[in-house]
Amino acid sequence: MTLQEDASAVVEAMRKALHENIKTRSKTVELEADSTIAAALTIGNSETSLSAPTTSPKMSLHRHSSEASSPTITTLTSPRIATATVPSDVAQDSPSSSAESEFTSRPPSGSGSGSASHSGADNHDEEPTSASERYADQPASVTSSVRDHVFEGGLRYHAYRAGKYSFPNDETEQTRDDMKHTMTLMLCNGEYFYAPVGEVLERGGEVLDLGTGTGIWAMELGDRYPLSTFTGVDLSPIQPTFVPENVHFFVDDFEEEWVDPDNKYDFIHLRHTLHSVQDPDALLKRIYRHLKPGAYFEAQEFLPAPASDDGTLTEETPYALRDYLRFMAQGMHVRAGCDMNAILALPDRLAAAGFTEIKTVVHKCPLGIWPRDKRLRCCGLFMRTAIMDGLRGISRRPLTALGWTPLQIEMFLVEVRKAVMDEGKHVYFPFHVVYARKPV
């Protein structure tokens, strides 16, 4: 096996473990690499260095296990829906004492799209032939218009507010969503958020996760802070049915008005989604209005601008991945009026919306396994795999909006993939964490 094949084998094992997050509950799993794979992932001990490799064979991932504390069934609901009864087969498996449970719909507290980088082809051989078959185990309140999907060019997209979000929601994308979650936690040294809200969540607070994707962030924090309530909203109904009892998911568009009362939330969170927001200023004003005085908002986002600190990539260096990201930014703007670099202007927009105590933290996430540091090396492996798996899926709608044909897209992606796999360039992407407080 080559070094690259070994590294790919490790990533594949990680992806399988991560995909279990969608179906089960929280437990730590450690992957032991053999000596050859250890060579592919060798890393030093420096926390900040982004230079070349040395040693270390072990890494741990979060995996969900049914052995965790008893879950409660919850459902994704359209804002138009009032209640639903759990089907008898589901009710029998529920830890609830009653054979039948009733779910009360929550009015829309907003929603978003899924995650930030996005995915590739779907395996149609494994897809149910209809929405009713695919979601047969979900409560009847999830209407077909919300549960259904749209298929374009062999890729699956959300049907609710169809076309608003540019990227797929298929199994590949869901796996990448969980992969990016683990990569982000590694990059942030295990921190789920940087805003100083830990004490509030310990006592019990209201948290809103915009663009929740698979819901993994909300579920893991729901386990960690059982006295707090976590609400995740998204355009896609791709979250699990069995979740912690203090976690709830809803299908909605968070760029429309919310019917939640003002001053409701202690913390509002947005990750890997700002690049798809069409009107950031309106969203920030809405967030400000629904936060309690003294509460916090936090956004986490990659800046799609590859960089290097050692001269292996300069502005003059031909680099297909950089060209690709510029075309993607143009396509996103043409198609939906979105700004893929919106994170750069966020601090100024927060100030204009009335927020104070605005803080920005920037991490460097490598692309590939070139760093010496173990943590960064693992992050780079995840980043590379997430990009490679997502290229076809995330490219289709934005590049089609520029007038590209499928053949032109695929031919260009050949060069992009070569650039992603090029270990001769020590590339990283800036990861911005921006948080701010609503004045008391």
Image (cartoon, rainbow, N blue to C red):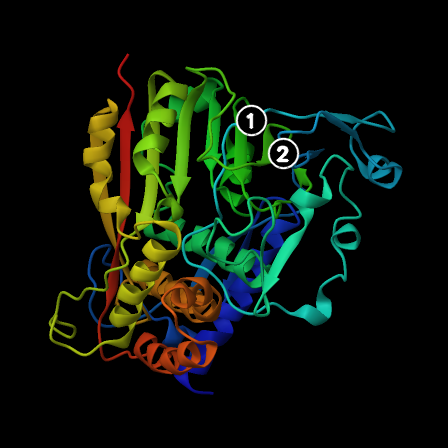
Q: Amino acid at mark 2?
A: Pro
Q: Picture quarter containing residue 69?
A: top right
Mark found first going from the N terminus, 2 or 1: 1
* Disc 2 from disc 1: Cα separation: 8 Å
Label 1 near label 2: C-beta < 8 Å?
Answer: yes
Residue drawn at x 39%, y 73% is 404
Residue 331 x %, y %: 35, 61
Secondary structure under the numbered disc 2 in the rendered image: loop
Tag 2 residue: 244
Q: Is residue 277 above or below residue 209?
A: below
Residue 186 x %, y %: 37, 52
Q: Left or right: where does residue 223 sit relative to residue 423?
A: right
Q: Amino acid at mark 1?
A: Pro
Residue drawn at x 71%, y 64% is 127
Q: Left or right: where does residue 405 sit relative to residue 338?
A: right
Tell me if residue 183 can be seen.
yes
Tag 1 residue: 226
